[in-house]
Image (tube, rainbow, N blue to C red):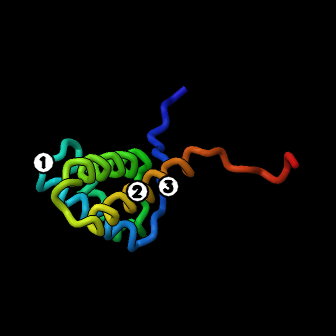
Amino acid sequence: MTSSSFQPTIALPAPVCEQAAQHLEQAAQRAIDGAAIPLKAFRAAADSDFTLPVQVVEQAAACLLVLATETAQTVRPSALRATISVALRLRDAVHLAHQPALSSRFW
């Protein structure tokens, strides 16, 4: 039996990818551990119809939550809400990707 190199992916809306890239840029500037890989992927997402590996989206969500925690006392509430909102959208997309697809044939 051979192992598959298949990685599950998520197609995200373009605005979410663009917002995530902006926030990941801030995370990378603050040297948040692990922000560089998702930043690179989100910057290149337009080339792949905004389809990203699930692991990268999950890593991006975690980085954005760390960014929100680290900047909570120093940024405007609206900026904090924006960062958290994008992180939660990414996290929700990951959760949906992990749910099994329902098939009508069993009903």
Residue 83 found in image quarter: bottom left
Classed neighbour count for the residue bearing mark 3: other residues with Cα under 10 Å, few (<14), some (14–19), many (≥20) = some
- Residue 17 lies, with reference to residue 6, above or below; the image says below
Name which residue type carries label 1.
Ala
Q: In this view, does 77 lie to the left or right of 4?
A: left
Label whose residue precedes the other's in the sequence (2 or 3):
2
For image coordinates 25% across by 62% down, the residue present is 23
Which numbered disc covers residue 52?
2
Q: Are marks 1 and 2 in contact (CB under 8 Å)?
A: no
Residue 53, given in percent of the width and then of the height, sits at 41, 51
Which numbered disc covers residue 31?
1
Question: Which quadrant of the rendered structure holds the N terminus?
Answer: top right
- Residue 23 lies, with reference to residue 99, above or below; the image says below
Please name which of the two marks, 2 or 3, marks the residue nearer to the observer: 3
Name which residue type carries label 3.
Ala
Q: Which residue lies furthest to the bottom in this view?
A: 15
Residue identified by numbered label 3: 93
Helix, strand or loop at mark 3: helix
Residue 63, given in percent of the width and then of the height, sits at 28, 48
Q: Are marks 3 and 1 in contact (CB under 8 Å)?
A: no
